[in-house]
Every structure is written in structure tokens, then in C-alpha cells.
Image: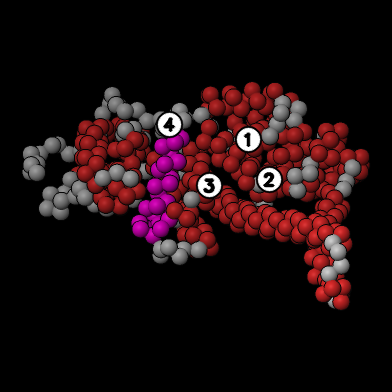
Amino acid sequence: MNGSKRPDNPDPLDDLLNAARWPAMLPDATLRLRREWQAISRNRSSSQTKWLQAAAMILIGFGVWFVVIKQRSAGVAQQRIVSMPPNPIIQNKPDIVAVRLANPAELAWALTAMSRQEIAGQSHGKSASVQKSPETLQALLQRDPTTGVQECLKLAELKHEEPAVSALKNVRGVAIEKLFARLDDPRIETRLAAARLLGKVDGPRVTEQLARMVAANQNRREALAALLQSDGVEAKAFLEQVQEKHGLESVLRSVTVQIKAF
Amino acid sequence: MGWDLDRASFDRLVLEHLDACQRLAVRLTGDPESAEDVVQDAMVRAARGWKTFRGEARFQTWLFRIVINAWRDRKTSGHAEPLPEIEDHCPNGPIDQLAGKEIGQVVAHAVSQLPPRQREVIILIVYEQMTICEAAAALEVSEGNVRTNLHYGRERLREKLRAFLPEEQPRERQ
């Protein structure tokens, strides 16, 4: 033993300590932790990209603002020139003045128009991907629950789950059971999306099933994530009880961090 | 390994040391379920603070420090950790106790009942084979503190496990 063993005078306590046998890890714990780490790692890099995107957007915004300001001052300058008495040099070279004054304005217009188009394009693209009415989703969930749930999960991953939630609230039944099954999905994004939907759909039966999962340590983190995102009274009461009686604060804390990261 | 550790290498290192972290967490908590929660908490912290690893200590030491801090926070948040159901004193003596329950579990239980700092030191030095210096780095305490806790921890264990130790013979005094 490092730091304590004297080779010339072995201590029998060392042999006894070396015989210690600790409980084995839960089955699949390593696999779960590895998946968890990969998900955390992936999210971290995507959040870094988000920061870069945000910084780029700020820079672009600042550039557009700068150009607009220039455009305004150019307009003022143009007005001044118009009101000034004719200058012989400018009078002789009107094209040069026009180019020098008009270019910043044209540039500003072009840039703002471009950014307007980009923004419009982006929002159009986004809305196209998430444009699904609750009625459409409800019909899909009733006709083909598997595909319907898949669509709902996609919306939840994009954080546009409102139509999905209202459709699921109307359908419930098989669709909710399928959502519960997705709490065990290999992809952490899907698991958390399912948790998000279940939390928002809420209801005593959903809360009861989630509470049972927490008690049985079956997808506990996902079940807690669902309960944390629920506005239901039962869910809140259960979470308080969990904190008081079972001491799962640190799990709740890390689940909360995970929810924020997604 | 040092300042230029990139994210991919860091991820690889964490995965390589995951088993060691789980082992450490089980020894600290004495309970596999709590251990899994501690490691998950530690992973979130490691992901947040990966840039704080500067290569001054071994990667395992750095990661163990995070696991230990996660475990400490879990304890201070009032979480009662379940310990294996093993009686401290068996009325029929150690032989019967051995027959009923494995001695290994009894020893593990005795370690799990040590005060937190002594438990940390014993686990790092006896079971994780760390040097005094490495244990001091992992626990963020002085080497003298580690030595003191090691001494008192061992004495406490000797007292608790006396029934399993051979008759005390006069030992050389230090």
C-alpha cells in the first residue's frame, strides 16, 4: 500500500483491506454513461457553434446598421449639395459626384435587401418544416400513431411542440404509450424530446406512470426531465416529495442542466 | 498532455477513464445506483470545465477530483446513501459472520462507514493505488492532511475489523 506499508513489517490490515468487495455496477451502467457522455459532448460542440452563429449574426446586424446610418448621412449630404449654389467643379463632373454619393446608398439598399431576403428565406424554411396544424397531427396520430409520434418528436426537438402537444392531448391512448417507449430511445435528443412532450401533455395518468418510472429507476433521468417540464400540480408535488424523501437533488440538478443544454 | 489538449482527445480520455470513475464512485457511495448518479453529475461538470485541465496533474487525478466533488455535493445536499445491510457485530463471532456474509462485503461496509475525508483518502491510496502526492492533488489538501487522515482511517478500520485480524502482537513503534 502506498505511503503506509513497511516491507519489513507487513500489516495484516492491508491484506484484509485488499479483500474488500464492493457492490457491482448496475447492468448496462457503463453503456448508459458512455451514451450520456457522447450526448453531452455533442451538445457542447453544437452549443459552441450556436455561439459562433450568434456572434456572426451580431456582426452582420452591426454591419447592416452601419450601412443604413451611412445611407442616411449620404441622403443628407445629397440634400445639402442640392441646396448649395452650383460648384463649378461638381457641375463639370456630375457623374463622379453621383457615383460617390449614390454608391453607399445602393450598397446599403442591396445589403439590407439581401439580409431581408435571407431572413425571409430562413423563416420561410423554418416555418415550412414546422408548419403542421394540430388537426393534421391529430389525424396522423389516429391513422398511424408511430409516424405521428415521430412527427411530434421532430417538432419537440425543434422546440415547436405546441401543435404536437395539443394533438397528443386530444388523441392520448396508444400515442402516449409510444411516447413512453421513446424515453428509452438510443438517441438522447429523442429521449429528451419525448420527455418534453410527456411533460407538456401532462395529466394524472401520465404523471403517475412517470412517478412509477422514477421510483423503479427505469429511465429515471428522462422521467424526471418530463416531470420537470410539466406544469401539473401532481408533477410538482411529486418532485417536491422526491427532493425531500429520496434526496435526488443532484440528479434533478444535472437533469435540469441537460434540459437547458438541449 | 497539456495545454493543447483538444476536445476530441479530451472526450477520448474521459471514455477511457469512465470505468475507473465508476469504480471510485461505487467505493465512495457504497451503492451502484448512487454511483451512477455521481458519475453522471461528474460528467456534466467535466464537460463544462474541460478547459480547466492544464496537464499539471494526471488526467485521472483531475477527473477523480471532479467525481469526489460531485459526491461531496451530493452528500451535503442531504442525500442519504444506502449502505449494504451488514451487521456491525455478530453475536456468534467472526467465524459465523464469515459463514453468513462474505468478509469482503464486511470490509467494504467498514470503509463505507468511515468519515468522508478518511474514506476518500483510504479509497484513493489503498484501492486506487495513488501516491500521497496524487491523493493530495485529487482532494485539494496538503500531503500532511492526507497522511493524518490515512493514519486515523487505518486505525479506525483496525478497530472495526479487529475480529478478523490475528491476535495483536507487539509491533515496532515508529
The chain containing the residue under callout 4 comes to: B
Q: Which mark is residue A224?
A: 1
B72 in magenta: yes
Q: Label 2 crowding class (10 Å Cα cut-off): few <14, some 14-19, many 20+?
A: many
Residue at numbered disc 4: B76
Secondary structure at numbered mark 3: helix
Q: CA distance from mark 2 to mark 3?
A: 17 Å
Residue at numbered disc 3: B44
The residue stretch that appears in magenta? B53-75
Report the number of numbered marks.
Answer: 4
Image point 68% across, 44% down: which residue? Answer: A192
Depth check: A9 or A64 in front?
A64
Would you place residue A249 above or below residue B140 in this image? above
Q: Which mark is residue A191?
A: 2
Q: CA distance from mark 3 to mark 1?
A: 17 Å
Q: CA distance from mark 2 to mark 4?
A: 30 Å
Tag 4: residue type? Thr
Would you place residue A115 above or below residue A93 in this image? above
The chain containing the residue under callout 3 comes to: B
Q: Earlier in the sequence, mark 2 or mark 1?
A: 2
Percent position of residue A71, x then y:
80, 59
Q: Is residue B54 left or right of residue B136?
A: right
Percent position of residue A232, x then y:
72, 26
Image point 75% across, 44% down: which residue? Answer: A159
Secondary structure at numbered mark 1: helix
On whether disc 3 and disc 4 are found on a single subunit, the reply is yes
Q: CA distance from mark 2 to mark 1?
A: 12 Å
Q: Main secondary structure of the magenta part?
A: helix
Q: Earlier in the sequence, mark 3 or mark 4?
A: 3
Would you place residue A127 above or below residue B173 in this image? below
